[in-house]
Amino acid sequence: MKLHFYKYQGAGNDFILVDNRENPVDHHNAKLISHLCDRRFGIGGDGIMFLQTKEGYDFEMVYYNADGQPSSMCGNGGRCIVAFAKFLGIIGKETDFLAVDGPHHARISESGDWVSLQMIDVDVISNDNEAYVLNTGSPHYVTLANDLANKDVYTEGHAIRNNETYHANGINVNFVEPKDNGYFVRTFERGVEDETYACGTGVTAVALAMAKHNNQTGTIETPIKVLGGDLNIRFDYDGISFTKIFLEGPAVQVFEGEVEIDS
Ligand SMILES: N[C@@H](CCC[C@H](N)C(=O)O)C(=O)O
């Protein structure tokens, strides 16, 4: 059968999107998912998402990493699927949808290519030596770095992701350096097992960890530069809990197509 798909990117974090409301594809097939995400033999993407119907919500987001495995929340994926839902005419300027980490609210620009996505509240940040470890929908390790533009993010990220502490469940590894009035971040992503151009839950984790690191409280806005563009994180922090967390940035349709898959 032919699978009709769309390709989106959010700050260079790229995804295959499938409207799975009618004649749904059975996506519980790791070999198929990893093949579709393969950049040489498939469509290519850091992940794939299926937009499905869900009672009580505008839609459900079902996310898989490029390795073919279902995973935890994808922030940039969440922003892209909101743009996709607007493109499909399912939503207007606002939406409430369900993802693996629970309900999400989002707002989208009139032009349909800029999305502000509310993320889960966070109240636990732990330390691993000098690094911060927290869950913003996905698990993240955040460490300060010097000369980040020239860092070997693959080698260092891969080593941390596979060390004794994290090997079993994996973790996303974010390197951060202050830049202008915000930060520059590079991320090694679990499930892609490589550096990606952006990670939404990753920059969210960085913004929260840096607020804690700098003893900042109140309403905080953190612009973050990544390899694929610019993202913005807004949140409230009272010294214990992070609430009203919004991940904001571009979500752009790149192309659509059809690919033959075994039915
Ligand atoms: N790219 C994502 C994170 C996707 C999930 C991650 N690879 C994991 O398995 O933890 C984002 O934008 O948040």
Image (cartoon, grey):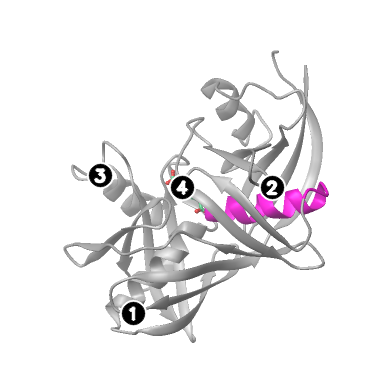
| Residue placed under numbered mark 3 in the picture | 166
Q: Which quarter of the image is occupied by the C terminus?
A: top right
Spatial CA span between label 1 and label 2: 32 Å
Up-down: is 215 above or below 44?
below
The x and y percentages for residue 34 are 55, 29
Task: Tell me which numbered mark, 2 or 3, is placed earlier along the sequence.
Answer: 2
Task: Tell me which numbered mark, 1 or 2, is placed earlier along the sequence.
Answer: 2
Magenta: main secondary structure equals helix
Numbered disc in front, either 4 or 3? 4
Q: Say what secondary structure mark 4 lies in.
A: loop
- Quarter of the view holding residue 193: top left
| Residue placed under numbered mark 1 in the picture | 238
What residue appears at the point 45 percent right and 65 percent down from the top-left corner?
A: 204
Q: Which span of residues is magenta-colored?
A: 74-90
Q: Is mark 1 within 8 Å of ligand 1?
A: no
Residue 143 on the magenta span: no
Residue 101: mark: 4
Residue 208: mark: none
Q: Residues within 10 Å of mark 3 (few under 14, many from 20)?
A: some
Q: Say what secondary structure mark 1 lies in.
A: loop
The x and y percentages for residue 236 are 43, 77
Residue nearer the viewer, 175 or 5:
5
